Amino acid sequence: MPESHVVGRAWAVGAERDFSSTDGHRGDAVPVVIPARGGAGKSRLRAPAGVDHGILARAMAQDTITAALACSRVSRGYVVSGDARLAAWAGRRSEAGGRSGDGGSPDRERPCRVLADPANGLGRAIDAGLRALGDAPVAAILLADLPALTAADLDAALAASLAALPAHGAAFVPDAEGTGTVLLVGEVARLRPAFGPDSAAAHARHAVRLDLDLPRLRRDVDDAADLASAVRLGVGRHTSAALSGVALVEPGAAVD
């Protein structure tokens, strides 16, 4: 197994290449594939009492997609989902050219294409998104359970990833625990998506690891403790609405 490369906070942003393609992006803007199970996802997450699990899971995906489409380094979003409600919502964004009244800046929001989930697991969903890119030379894959994500954090992560590509071909950002992956960016021909348990170790075999100080990006939500942590960071309006009026208690914490 080749030794993995680790890049910390001291990354340079001045080494972007021109990754122009027929996807319509130039320079440092890339298409982003977002596999999103929506209401059917997050089986390990136990929703707080009084909160519908499906609504919460869908809301987290909506906040992730909203942040991604507001990111200046994203050329277009490719949402892969089998959730009819989430797909319809994302489709309305596409029809509006990325403008759906979610509070983002209309002149910054990016268009969105919705693709059917082949329903054979996360890997197949990602493959469906990558196939839709045509001849785009570079792409990003972003997981959809990042309710605290902001466009600014994703912008910084994409800048760091693109700066790393000339030397490494692919880059990834691990989750807050350091064992999973929230973002994978690379030359499409060299991408080897391996999301799932211990995906950071799997991705380190072919991509440079970027341990960036971007807690909102790296806070994925798999369980109640993760959700409480995301809420402390500040979640998007969809997740906030799904949790409206609910007091979150972390497992093991004392209840007054």
Image: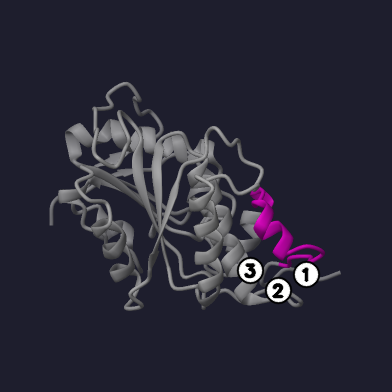
Q: How many marks?
A: 3
Looking at the image, do the residues carrying marks 3 and 1 touch, with CB atoms under 8 Å apart? no
Residue 97 at x, y percent in the picture: 50, 45
Residue 84 relative to residue 105: left or right: left
- Secondary element type, mark 1: loop
Query: Does the magenta run of residues contain 241?
Result: yes
Q: Residues within 10 Å of mark 1 (few under 14, many from 20)?
A: few
What segment carries the magenta color?
A: 232-249
Q: Which residue is mark 3?
A: 56
Query: Does the magenta run of residues contain 54?
Result: no
Residue 222 relative to residue 164: left or right: right
Answer with the quarter of the image where residue 249 lies.
bottom right
- Secondary element type, mark 2: loop
Nearer the camera: disc 3 or disc 1:
3
Q: Which residue is mark 2?
A: 48
Amino acid carrying mark 1 in the image: Ala
